[in-house]
Image (tube, grey):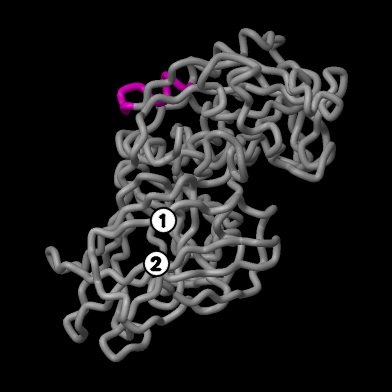
Amino acid sequence: MKKKKLFFALFTATLSSFLGGCGMFDSSSSEDAEVDPLSGLPFSAYPNDAAVNDSANAYLATGLMLTVHPGASYTISFDADSNYDSPKLQLYRLKFPTDSTYTYRQIRNISAKEVDGKWVYTFDCSENDRAYWATTLLGDDGSYYRGKVSGFSFKGVGAYDSHLSLNLIVAGSYGGTSDSVSLDSLSKMILEGFRSALSGGGIIVDTLYLHHASERTDLATSYPDNKQWQAGKSSDDMFLTELGGWPDSLGEKGIYYALDLILVHRIESAGVLGYSILFGGSLGGGTGSTVVIGTQYYTISPLIEYPQKASEIVATTVHESGHFLGLRHTTSTMADMESSGDFSNKEDGLDDTPYCSDYLPFTASSSTLVKRSDVRFLPMPRLVLSKSLSSCPDASNPMFPSAVDVESTGFTVEQKALAKATLELYKH
């Protein structure tokens, strides 16, 4: 199989090596023609994402990036076009040898099965860790499929259980809360907040481990307990990635694969309470494995620092961890759409979460796509916005993009199901 090299603008540091191979349920001939992914791979798709994703429909045939996980089984489907024969789905494994380049190698061609008016492709993955693949569609004339692609769906069934533990890692000194809640008490509140929000959804939150970054002998000088850590200012890495994957040697067995929640003094961006990568994809360290929360925040105007109440910190921690588990904002912000490049995703696509049309400053048409080359990693912040948003129909949902003075109603049935399906994909 041929290997090719392309230049690629990355959002973040070099990704880890990709190991293992991938087996397909289909055993199509390797003699089929190849139609390689076009340069750039400007859009990504994530398993079980319910959003509209016009970008996936537009780029499946010529090059769409997929996030895949070890041991998982996957299905890609889209509406059959009666004017064309079903194309073959071609899958390519991507590697990122440097910060600025990627290479790709074809894995296999997969034939479609027609089911209820859709063309359906099934495959599984035996990678050893999270990996990135690319798609193309091979038409019967040996070139890119020219039929219409609509109704794209990417489903994944994971190989792991639905148990989750948490690491609360304090970077620098604990900033305290406006209601003077101790760190131990805040830890207990976060654990209870997770259990309450996810109750009845099948995810079992086992425990929370409390750590100080200064405990890490390899990093202790970087995170002194007497220093207020400001994410985005105290170091170049806003996500404090090096604190992810807490070593088992510094605690109980299993800590390494707990979800790493990094508590900092504040985030050096006005109006931001916390952030995570959407579909973070990695428990046990690596890019996108950390959720960052501030105990204080800057107001947007004027620029003044304010401490948060403990309950507000808990709400932000649950919200950002929801992103890590595949949950989008119930109502998209312009920043959400601009960072993904896909303006069709005005909301999360779930039937049981309303969205706030009065809030969204939406000006582009629903099919607008802005080509991006860094969309594997979508940072999703929780913001301090107008209190008037409390009238939005989704204001009480934990995934509403703004902090509002409304009592949370917890995750919906569909949100819990999506979070569980995502967790079961992540190696742990």
The 10 Å Cα crowd at callout 1, few under 14, some 14 to 19, many 20 or more, is few
Q: Amino acid at mark 1?
A: Gly
Image-quadrant location for residue 344: bottom left
Q: Position of residue 83 (x, y in %)?
A: 19, 86
Q: Position of residue 415 (x, y in %)?
A: 36, 38
- The residue lying at 19 percent from left, 82 percent from top is 85
Q: Which mark is residue 107?
A: 2
Q: Amino acid at mark 2?
A: Ile
Tell me whether the residue at label 2 lies in contact with that at label 1, contact meaning CB atoms closer than 8 angstroms. Answer: yes
The residue under label 1 is 21
Q: Residue 366: tell me if it is visible.
A: no
- The residue lying at 39 percent from left, 55 percent from top is 51
Q: Position of residue 42 (x, y in %)?
A: 54, 69
Q: Of helix, strand and loop, which one carries label 2?
A: strand
- The residue lying at 39 percent from left, 25 percent from top is 163
Q: Residue 276: tell me if it is visible.
A: yes
**Where does the magenta region start and end?**
194-202
- Of residues 355 and 220, the one drawn nearer to the viewer in this rendering: 220
Can you say whether 413 is above or below 44 in the image? above
Distance of mark 2 from mark 1, alpha carbons? 8 Å
- Of residues 91 and 385, the one drawn nearer to the viewer in this rendering: 91
Q: Residue furthest left?
A: 116
- Of residues 231 and 223, the one drawn nearer to the viewer in this rendering: 223
Q: Magenta stretch: residue 96 in it?
A: no
Image-quadrant location for residue 256: top right
